[in-house]
Image (spheres, grey):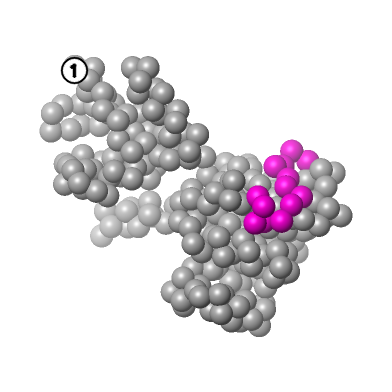
Amino acid sequence: MKLSLLATLNEERVARRAAIIITDVATGAQRFVRESELVSEPWASDPLSRTLADALRTGKSGMVDTPQGQAFLTVSVPPVRMIVTGAVHISQALAPMAKLAGFDVVIIDPRTAFATPERFPDVDLRPEWPDAVIPSLGFDRYTAFVALTHDPKIDDVALDLALKSDAFYVGALGSRKTHGKRVERLRAAGFDDNTIGRIRAPIGLNIGAVSPAEIAVSILAEAIGALRAERMAARAAKAA
């Protein structure tokens, strides 16, 4: 790989942006494609655009057949991440399970009585207010956001930022009554109903979860389902 391409790829990795290097197997010629370029000309009309989009969806590098012959796709996608507000009991169960599933986990909670390393060992723990932390982390399409504090002073700021982003999953804990009040606050803040409808609330798959650990399972399963939704839709389309 040329050093210039490697440097560009590293820049994209640091910025949490997906990209692909296409290597012509016969000639060794290489091209660099950013994910953002796949939705704009000339890539939108390029015969490889669908192949590249599929490769980004799976995140897997490998050989592909192209009209010009075989090519190797070096796929680079950011690690999936789960940002959670609330150092609560559900978070204590959710964090290790999400890490096992491949998520980078960040727990944010300004309440230092809860946000302690003893309760969250080996977790990126931020005992600060969300508006002080999240702008530097950034929400993107590889990020899931989970609001668990039940405290609007903490959750709403983060929800505001998540709904303005491409986060692939936005979920919030709370009863239907609690969520109804949340919806009223978000409408008052200027969000339309379509945008507010992105929030999974009550959070998690409906599996009858009761304990914090069971609720954590339902949240993680729902987030994984959202992460793989495009892939599942593509499989269903092929099977139809």
Nearer-the-camera pick, 140 or 129: 129
In the rendered view, does 135 fall on the left or right side of 29? right
Residue indicated by mark 1: 26
Nearer-the-camera pick, 194 or 213: 194
Q: Residue at x 53, y 44 (%)?
A: 80
Indicate the quadrant where residue 166 lies.
bottom left
The picture places residue 240, in percent across and down from the top left corner, at 25, 60
Q: Is residue 139 visible?
A: yes
In the rendered view, does 2 fall on the left or right side of 120? left
In the rendered view, does 27 fall on the left or right side of 173? left
Q: Could you tell me which quadrant the N terminus lies in?
A: top left
Disc 1 residue type?
Ala
Nearer-the-camera pick, 133 or 193: 133
The picture places residue 210, in percent across and down from the top left corner, at 73, 68
Indicate the quadrant where residue 89 lies.
bottom right
Q: Is residue 207 visible?
A: no
Q: Residue at x 61, y 51 (%)?
A: 134
The picture places residue 231, in percent across and down from the top left corner, at 38, 51
Q: Is residue 238 above or below residue 47?
A: below
The picture places residue 158, in percent across and down from the top left corner, at 62, 61
> Is residue 211 rendered magenta in the image?
no
Q: How many marks?
A: 1
In the rendered view, does 115 fall on the left or right side of 16? right
Q: Secondary structure at mark 1?
A: loop
Question: What's drawn in magenta, residue-wise?
Answer: 121-133
Crowd band around label 1 with a 10 angstrom C-alpha radius: few (<14), some (14–19), many (20+): few
Q: Residue at x 13, y 28 (%)?
A: 68
